[in-house]
């Protein structure tokens, strides 16, 4: 009886994990990214867009085995109010670097403008 319960529990956890992974992948899609930093284009090309709740999103290289740019593996744009977001970059060393607050660009809603950076994902 205990073995059957353990097996059933293990199977249900596996199905949950598979479902969660499939759901996460279904929210991922390749988009055109443009990231500017310090007035220079740091990235202009395809990247993986990972939708999160409330309009927040993450970006990573289209090739998940490579960094997004420089030492940065992923960028996160976390919505804090309708037109404002907190932007961070996670480095290879595990450092979660704060880029700062960004505002949705009025001229292009696919872009977020910070004090010295711009992130666009279309």
Image (tube, grey):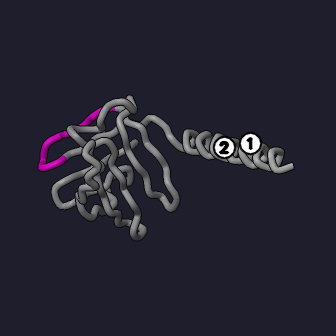
How many residues crowd around disc 1 within 10 Å: few (fewer than 14), some, or many (20 or more)? few
Q: Dividing the picture into quarters, in which one does residue 36 lie?
A: top left
State whether residue 45 is above or below residue 93.
above
Q: Position of residue 73 (x, y in %)?
A: 31, 41
Q: Position of residue 104 (x, y in %)?
A: 34, 60
Side (left or right) of 31 relative to 37: right
Nearer to us: label 2 or label 1: 1
Tell which of 112 and 52 is nearer to you: 52
Q: Dividing the picture into quarters, in which one does residue 59 lie?
A: top left
Q: Which residue reaches farthest right?
A: 1
How many residues crowd around disc 2 within 10 Å: few (fewer than 14), some, or many (20 or more)? few
Q: Is residue 41 magenta?
A: yes
Tell which of 45 and 90 is nearer to you: 90
Q: Is residue 6 magenta?
A: no
Disc number placed over residue 11 in the picture, else none: 1
Element marked by disc 1:
helix
* Residue drawn 49% across the image and 54% down it: 52
Element marked by disc 2:
helix
The answer to whether marks 2 and 1 mark residues whose Cβ atoms lie closer than 8 Å is no
State whether residue 79 is above or below residue 64.
below
Which SS does the magenta portion mostly show? strand
* Residue drawn 35% across the image and 35% down it: 61
* First-in-chain label (2 vs 1): 1
The C terminus appears in which quarter of the rendering?
A: top left
Q: Position of residue 28 (x, y in %)?
A: 50, 40
* Residue drawn 75% across the image and 49% down it: 9
Q: Which residue reaches farthest front?
A: 2
Q: Position of residue 49 (x, y in %)?
A: 43, 42
Residue occupied by mark 2: 19
Segment tinted magenta in the rendering: 37-45
Disc number placed over residue 118 in the picture, else none: none
């Amino acid at each position: 009886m205990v073995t059957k319960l353990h097996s059933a529990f293990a199977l249900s956890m596996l199905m949950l994990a598979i479902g969660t992974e499939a759901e996460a992948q279904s929210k991922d899609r390749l988009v055109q990214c443009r990231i500017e930093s310090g007035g220079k284009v740091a990235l202009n090309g395809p990247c993986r867009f990972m939708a999160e709740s409330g309009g927040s999103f993450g970006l990573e290289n289209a090739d998940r085995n490579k960094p997004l740019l420089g030492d940065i593996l992923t960028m996160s744009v976390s919505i804090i109010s309708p037109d404002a977001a907190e932007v961070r970059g996670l480095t290879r060393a595990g450092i979660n670097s704060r880029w700062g607050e960004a505002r949705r660009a009025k001229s292009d809603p696919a872009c977020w403008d910070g004090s010295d950076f711009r992130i666009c994902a279309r």
